[in-house]
Image: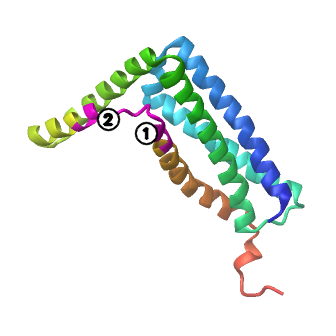
Amino acid sequence: MNQTIKSVGIKIGLLLALILSIVNVGIYFYDYSIMASTANGFILLFVIIIFGLIATALAKYKIGGFITFKEAFTPYIITVSIGILISTLVQYLIYSVLDPETGELLKETFRNLYVSEISKSNGTQEEIAASIAEVQKTNPLTFGGLISSAVIRIAMLSVVGILIALTFRNRSEFSSTKQ
């Protein structure tokens, strides 16, 4: 694997991690409940995708314009993984280590959001009550819970990365007329 490609992914990933961490700290100081906002989640996903796209484009440029699918996907997934994992670590440090009281308030905000959403579903009252009871037992801000959530986000975003890699790879890579 080309070291340039990995280097681009790492550099852009660290920049993404820095930006996401600054956003996390800013949200903590401004209003922690924004963390539970659906709009905040979509905005951050969009930012992450943009950084992955930039990493792929920059890698293609740095290696001279010819890039295979694997070479196009690698900087994207490295960027996304580094950004998400480091910002997840920052969230854990803020809400579980430095200020667990605010972490408890944030957990309650997440639970209220979940209860509000599940109550709108067409399930029976027993199913809704069982689901609410289950979510009351969970703690999304534990290290394991946050890492699990981060891995799920990385997996979901890898689908976008596959589409980006397919777009950036050279068309002749899979053609039967290769010489």
Residue under label 2: 138
Residue 120 appears in the picture as rendered: no
Residue 143 included in the magenta stretch of the image: yes
Q: How is the image coloured?
A: rainbow
- Residue 140 placed where, x, y %? 40, 34
CB under 8 Å between discs 1 and 2: yes
Q: Quadrant of the C terminus?
A: bottom right
Magenta segment: does it hold 139?
yes
> Is 18 displayed left or right of 106 in the figure?
right
Quadrant occupied by the N terminus? bottom right
Residue assigned mark 1: 145
Helix, strand or loop status at disc 2: loop
Q: Position of residue 133 (x, y in %)?
A: 20, 34
Q: Is residue 104 above or below residue 146?
A: above
- Residue at x 51% of width, y 48% of height: 151
Residue 38: image x %, image y %? 43, 31
Of the pair 58 and 129, the residue shown nearer to us: 129
Q: Amino acid at mark 1?
A: Gly
**Residue at position x 67%, y 61% in the image:** 165
Drawn side of residue 7 relative to residue 175, left or right: right
The secondary structure making up most of the magenta span is helix
Disc number for residue 110: none
Q: Look at the picture and state if 96 lies above or below 7.
A: above
Q: Amino acid at mark 2?
A: Thr
How packed is label 1: few (under 14 Cα within 10 Å), some, or many (20 or more)?
some
Q: Residues within 10 Å of mark 2 (few under 14, many from 20)?
A: few
The foreground one among 173 and 28 is 28
Q: Which residues are magenta?
A: 134-147
Residue at 81% across / 54% down in the picture? 59
